[in-house]
Amino acid sequence: MRRFLLATTAIAALAAHVQMAQAADATGYADYPSAFISFEGGYYFNASQENVDFDDDDSELGNLDSLRPGGNGWQGRFELGQRLNETWDFKIGLSAIALGSDSTDDNDARSDASQDMDLQILDLEAGYHLGGMDSVEARLFAGVRGLHARSQTSWHADEGDKLGEFDDEVYALGPRVGVDLAVPMDTHDIALVGSVSGSLLFGTVDSEASYRGDPIFNDYDTDTTDTQTLWNVEGMAGVAFGIGERADLTLGYRVAQFGDLAVDRSDVDKAGDFSANGESDLLLHGPFARLTVEIP
């Protein structure tokens, strides 16, 4: 029998089929400390609500659809960690999310608009493996999450002669906690895995707004910086398959919500005026695949 690698992913701990001592006797590679590395890739569908809305009464922008904070896009994650003993591990994880553009246009009014967003995440965490449960493998973890996000919105009117732009950049840092669960199947090479986590992040948002192009209205550039409190919850469910003695392949589905991350604006008009309405959430979900390898 083989052992699925433990604590090798950002949001899922894989199941153990036998005790570590038995795995060490059978394979000869499970002595502590042992390192692990993982690579993940996936696709995100953007289910966020619109956060940029145009003035319905504006002759040039009124027929444009509202914009979400980016379109659908890709995500990737790299992790490196070490299992210290039967109980404790630690790891570092780096994620990147690149969302495409959410766009709209009105050919009759010769206007268009688009918004995109990307995120980078750094996690440092320590994990504690609960014992005494034969049918479920559980890992509690706690650590620190750092977040950088940037959203860029632009709109054009009068065949591009008028140009408006919003550029929002967020830096935040805060605590993160969660639990990983795994249930081994009778085949001993497959496990059902799942995880939930949450974080509370404190930081700043730098917002720039600019307008160019109409001699009647004044061009402008503004730049404001405010403190920001964000929250993030994530969950995943999947199936982990053993590949040989030292690797696992996990296929699953992930959901992530970043609360109050996107700046909310409404009534944007051709003169560059708009109403600031606070913040809105970024909600993402989609499939992923992850390869985890133990380094003896």
Image: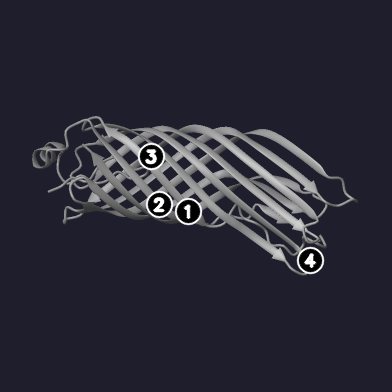
Which residue in the protein does label 3 denote? 178
Instruction: Tell me the kind of residue under disc 4.
Output: Ala
Q: CA distance from mark 3 to mark 2?
A: 21 Å
Secondary structure beneath dot 4 equals loop
Q: Quadrant of the C terminus?
A: top left
The residue positioned 62% from the left and 46% from the top of the image is 151
Circle 3 SS class:
strand
State yes or no: discs 2 and 1 in contact (Cβ < 8 Å).
yes
Residue 84 in the image: state x and y as whole percent.
Answer: 25, 30
Q: Mark 4 and mark 2 in contact? Answer it, CB < 8 Å.
A: no
The residue labelled by disc 4 is 109
Q: Which residue is mark 2?
A: 41
Asked which secondary structure carries label 2, the reply is: strand
Q: CA distance from mark 3 to mark 4?
A: 50 Å
3D distance between C-alphas at marks 2 and 1: 8 Å
- For marks 1 and 4, give the CA distance: 33 Å
- Marks 4 and 2, the one that precedes in the sequence: 2
Residue 269 shows up from this direction: no
**Which comes sooner in the sequence, label 3 or label 2?**
2
**How many neighbours does mark 2 have within 10 angstroms: few (below 14), some (14-19), or many (20 or more)?**
some
Give left or right: position of 52 versus 13.
right
Tell me the CA gap for discs 1 and 3: 24 Å
